[in-house]
Each structure stands twice: as C-alpha cells, then as structure tokens.
C-alpha cells in the first residue's frame, strides 16, 4: 500500500504514487467527464506536488510513473519507471528550485479522462548564479476512479 503525499488517505496501488482528487471527477456512462475548471485544477494540483517533490525529495518523483510510462529528457527517450527513476536521480545536481511561470491544462480524451499539462518556468540550481528556462509536458492518465499517473513526460531546457 502506498500512502499519497497529497492527502493522508492511503491508496492501494502498484509501484506508483497517485493523488486523489475527491469530488473533482464526474463519471458518466463509463467515461470520465471534467469541465475546463476541473481539468485546470487537476493540472495545477499535479504541478505543485510534482515540483515540490522534485526539488525536495527527487527519488519520490518516480512514484508518479508506471512501468509503461515514457520520459523524453532533452531528446533522450527513456521507458519505464525504473529507467526514469535512474535518469532523474543521476542528474548532475542534488538540489534545485523550480519557479513555475505558466501551467496550461486541457483534456486529452473525453472518453478516458486523460489530461495534457504544459509547464513553463525556470530552474535554479544551488550554487549557480543564473537560472535555466524550461518547458515540460505531462500526459496524465486516470488510475482507478480518482487518481492519475504520468504516462508521458517531455522535458526541454530553453537555450538562447
């Protein structure tokens, strides 16, 4: 059993960390329906939690992924939670701070309830004078009735 870091309620799941969004989803005819406000709320909740964990306990970020999740990191394609975890934990810095400028979210599929989240911001590495601009896209897919996991993640630094 994994305990969600977003709320104190325990959520049984296999090797992933998902967060409950009680009262956000409406189930209709075997599909999940969300209005734009709910989609944006889920996207923002995810972004806040993801970067908080990345900045303070990077090893825990891997818990948002599943064995079939994919990460494209600066053009390098990485498949699976173990490989994603390894990549993120081998980055050449220990601590950092993400400052989020924008979060844009939209439904990816009305039949599955998945969400695309696009993030832009800056990344400040400890000991570095200048921050780095970045963009990151997440494809969030429902897991169970009230949770999501990261199916796809694309990260790019913006040079210039």
Image: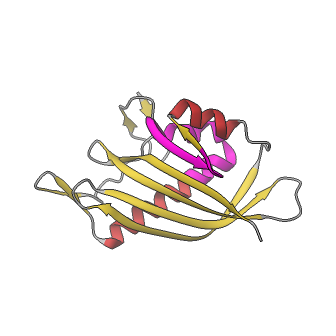
**Where does residue 153 sit, x and y in percent of width and height?**
52, 51
Residue farthest to the left, as pictured: 29
The quadrant of the image that shows the C terminus is: bottom right
Q: Left or right: where does residue 74 sit relative to residue 35? A: right
* Residue 51 colored in magenta in the image: yes
Which residue: 64% across, 58% down? 156
- Report the front residue among 114 and 60: 114
Which residue: 37% across, 36% down? 11
On the image, which quarter does residue 9 sit in?
top left
**Where does residue 144 sit, x and y in percent of width and height?**
28, 41
On the image, which quarter does residue 12 sit in?
top left
- Report the front residue among 26 and 130: 130
Which residue: 47% across, 49% down? 152
**Where does residue 19 sit, x and y in percent of width and height?**
42, 46
Identify the magenta region.
50-76
Q: Left or right: where does residue 119 sit relative to residue 36? A: right
| Vertical position of residue 17 compared to residue 113: above or below | above
| Vertical position of residue 133 compared to residue 138: above or below | below
């Amino acid at each position: 059993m994994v305990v969600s870091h977003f709320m104190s309620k325990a959520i049984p799941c296999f090797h992933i960390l998902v967060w409950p969004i009680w009262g956000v989803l409406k189930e209709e005819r075997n599909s999940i329906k969300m209005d734009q406000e709910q989609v944006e709320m889920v996207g923002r909740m995810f972004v806040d939690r993801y970067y908080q964990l990345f900045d303070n306990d990077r090893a825990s970020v891997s818990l948002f992924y599943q064995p079939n999740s994919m990460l494209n990191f600066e053009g390098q394609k990485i498949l699976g939670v173990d490989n994603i975890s390894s990549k993120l934990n081998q980055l050449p810095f220990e601590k950092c701070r993400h400052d989020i400028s924008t979060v844009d979210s939209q439904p990816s599929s009305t039949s599955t309830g998945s969400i695309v989240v696009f993030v832009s911001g800056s990344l400040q590495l400890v000991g570095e004078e200048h921050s780095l601009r970045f963009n990151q896209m997440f494809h969030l897919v429902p897991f169970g009735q009230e949770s999501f996991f990261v199916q796809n993640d694309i990260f790019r630094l913006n040079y210039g």
